Each structure stands twice: as C-alpha cells, then as structure tokens.
Image: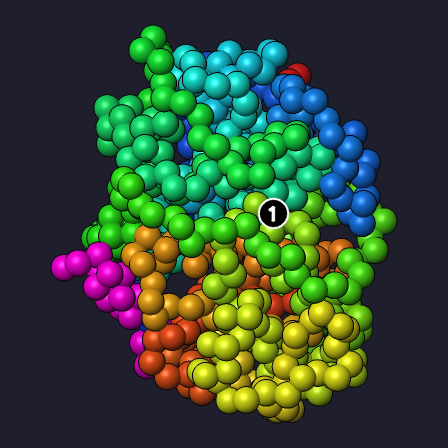
Amino acid sequence: MEAAAVVRAYHQRSKHQLQRYAAGPETLDWDAQPDPFRRWAGAPLLGLPLVADALQTAWCDLPGPAQPLSVDSIGALLELSFGLTAWKQQGPDRWALRANPSSGNLHPTEVYLLVQGVAGLDDGLYHYAPREHGLELRARGGIGKPGLWLGLSSIQWREAWKYGERAFRYCQLDTGHALGALRYAAATLGWQARLVQGMAHDELAALLGLDRSADFGRAEAEEPELLLQIGPAMPARGTAPGAWDAAVQWHGQASRLDAHPMYRWPVIAEVAAATRAPTGTARAADIEPSAAPAQPAAPRSEMPAATLIRQRRSAQHFDRRARMSAAAFFRIAAALLPGAGLPWDAWPRPPRVHAVFYVHRVDGLAPGAYLLPRSDSGAALLAQALPSGRPVAQAPAGLPLQCLAENPALAGSLRTLSCHQAIASDACFALSLLAEFDTLEPWRYRERFHEAGLIGQVLYLQAEAEGHRGTGIGCYFDDAVHELLGLSGDPLQAFYHFTVGVAMDDARIVFEAPYAHRENNGA
C-alpha cells in the first residue's frame, strides 16, 4: 500500500466512533505500567544544577535578557521544558509531573542534546534524564560545528500500552507540546529555538544514535521526531550540525520499560514508517510565518515566567459555575495566531490547523460555536467546508473570530462528543482543532499533530497566565464532531480537543517537591 493510503487508512481506523472506540487494550495492569523514565546503563551521568529560580523575568516581559551558553543555562532550559515539576501521591500511588504535558501522563517523548564547544561539557550527544535532572553521555565526539541542538524522539509503546492503535496520534501531539515547552523555556533565557527543516528520518536517527539496534537490544525502540537548534543570537532558520567524526565513541544500553507487554499494535509501526520524511524531501512550502495583524494586548501576568511554567497542570475537574471575562478569552484566542509572538517563531511552516471554540461561560459572548481561522487560505477553506458565520462585533481588531451558531445546550452535546467526559462541559470554553487534511503529503501527517500540540501548549500557558487552567483531550468521537460542525469529506479533520476553565483541586492528593530526592541524597 502506498504511504498516502496507509495514512488515510490509519486515520480512519484510529477514529473513536459513538458505537465503538478505536482498538485498544481490553484491560490495564497499572502495576505493570511501562517505566516513565528511560536510562542508558553504562553511560556517564552528569548532574545538572537546579537554577531556574534565578530567572526572574516576568511572563509579560518574555523573552528575558540573553544568558550565555553554559552548563547552568542548559540546566535551566531543561528544568523548565522537560524537568519534573512536582510529585503527586494519593494513597499508595505516587507519580511525577513534568513541565511538558503528556497524554495520560505517560510521557513517550525522549530528549537528546547535541553539544559542541560548550564549556564544562564534552562534545557529543547526551540523553536527558528528568528524574535525576542530569545528562547521560551517549556519544563522545565532534559534530562539525559549534552550538547546541535538541532532538526529540517518541517511545510509542508508552502510549500504546494504554491507548492501543490511537497511540501514534498522541505521540505526535506530545511532540508538539514538547516543542512549545522548549520554546517558552528558551525564552526565559533570552534564547531562540529554530526547527531544523528538511532532515530525512534516517539522517536524524543516525545523528541521535537511534539507529543503533545493538544499543537497544530488547528495549523499546525510539522514533526520531524533530531537531531544533537552540541558543542566543540564532540565525533566522535552523541549520543542522555536521556528521559524526570518525573517532566518535558510543556509550550506554537502553533500559527496557516493559518486560512483559500484553498486546501488539502493528498498525502503529505501519503508519510510523509511512510518515517518515524521505531523503531529499522537498520543503519548498515551508516558510517563515508572515506578520499578523495587530494583536490584542498579551496577558499581563507579573508572575516570573519560570514559576508560571512550573505550576502548569492538567485540570482533572472544572468548576461548572465559573466564568471567564471576554478580555481574557480574546487574549487567549489571539495567542493562537501565527504572528502573536512566542512560540510561533519556532514553527516556520504555514498554519494548517484552525480552531473552533465552544463557548460555555464567557462574559459577553452567547454560548455557541465560534470559528478562528489561522491563515487567509485556511479562512477560504473553512468558508467552503462549514456553514457561514458572522464576525464577532466585540472581538478586538486583528482577531478574525466568527460566530458559527449560538447554542445554549452545546455543553451537554460536547460532553457526549468528548467521550462522555464532564470536563468538556464544565469548562468555560472548549475547542476542536481542525487540520487541513485533503491534500496531505504522508510525512506532513505528523506535522499536523505537531502543530495541534503546539497550539495546545499555548493554551496551557496562556490559561495559567489568565488565572485559569487547561486540559488537552485526545478522546473524542471524530466523525460525530464533524457531523456537529457540518463537515463532510476529508478537507478538514478534528486532530485535538482542549478545554479551559477554573480547576477544582482534589484534597486527597498530596504534592511533593520535584527534586527533594536529590537534596535528600546530597546531590
């Protein structure tokens, strides 16, 4: 089967329907959950300093002043993007939270650093160990040019263990969230993060050492996803490092995360292979985002950005009586536009994902469905695919928000469509992210999810800045959502749901500091 046909077949097969869910495990043994922390046995570990508290730039003042490239600044970058933010405990169960959100808190995303010319670090490749907040030296050797690059990979079994065939989608969404987490963290240091475009799958796998099957043995494989160039005073477009020199020395054996997997999902491997970027892939359509119209004022949170980033949580329950001001809603919506500043300078591709807001309780806005096209071409496509809307008169200039339909009973319908989850109806607003799908090239299937996940990360942090909280929803009935909106055919497909509201805390859950175990061990 051709790659494009594989992608379409997978997307249809992995949809949840009202009459059935996508194929997944029939039972879960929570005591046998895959280890959320991969380690590389035999790789030297360098502990990183916990210095993010020293970064006092307020959220409203990002980006902060440029910091020099050093072990300390790299430690802060990783602490604020992929580090632990808390431990939670309820009864005998204890689990970690991280700066980057993840579907089901399963964390399929692994992080690698390519370093050359940074004082205090040997040139080479490092794996980030978030529990230890340290770097494991995977390879010592030169990569051709000085600088810092960060690579992302996915361990698909971590998601498949719980979600079955739909797991590939969630790994890609998590990659987009990770990209956003990294860009915001870099901004606290006054740094840029540039996506390296045009790299083939095999090139990235070799650069990150993910093609070294002997180093994995029986451990779960990792799928390379993205590479970013990071640091102060970056070029407008990310550039790749050179190839490994002949004297490179490799270290470490990957830990096995699940010694006794109960299920296999071969369709995930099929769609992963079909969506890998081939050598020589043309990326002529990848462009820097054009300047957007004037935007409403950004959230004026005076909280240190490092604090706001680390307090981000996924809400488990919302206060169904809470309301949101129209000003806060408009600021959050405007932050999704490609010219709105962070983190969109890290996404040099045309916007292909658009938002439909389901407003429940926003002051001054009638309950109903509202459309936000994120590009001119997207607006034209949406106008053809959806019922015509009317401009929202009270929306600030530069925010092309349209009211599709008023519907006071929408909350109940959305709860049903979001796999019967109350969080979809109890939020102040929810939204569907619609991706342009009809003319999709196979390797861009991943990109659509990455863009949707990046939007999700904006929503998480902008909600925090407004005193609210967000939660991503990967479980929804795909075609029923399309039917609600009046969509037919394949021009647009729902790729993600999200909710924002006022969180209700569970008093039974105890929080612990993220790195108290380091202090107790004298680290």
| In magenta stretch: residue 4 | yes
- Residue 303 in view, yes or no: yes
Quadrant for the C terminus, please.
Answer: top right
**Residue located farthest toward the top when viewing the structure as drawn:** 247
| 342 with respect to 124 (left or right) | right
| Residue 483, placed above or below residue 333 | below
Residue nearest the viewer, comparing 119 with 315: 119
| 509 with respect to 36 (left or right) | right
Which residue is drawn at the image coordinates 38% and 48% (left, top)? 283
Residue 499's spot in the image, x, y percent? 60, 68
- Residue 263 in view, yes or no: no
Residue wearing tag 1: 345
Residue nearest the viewer, comparing 317 with 101: 101
Which residue is drawn at the image coordinates 81% and 39% (left, top)? 57
Residue 437's spot in the image, x, y percent? 37, 68
Which residue is drawn at the image coordinates 53% and 85% (left, top)? 413
Quarter of the image for residue 67 reads top right
Magenta span covers which residues?
1-20
Residue 23's spot in the image, x, y percent? 28, 65
**Residue located farthest toward the left when viewing the structure as drawn:** 1
| 470 with respect to 250 (left or right) | right
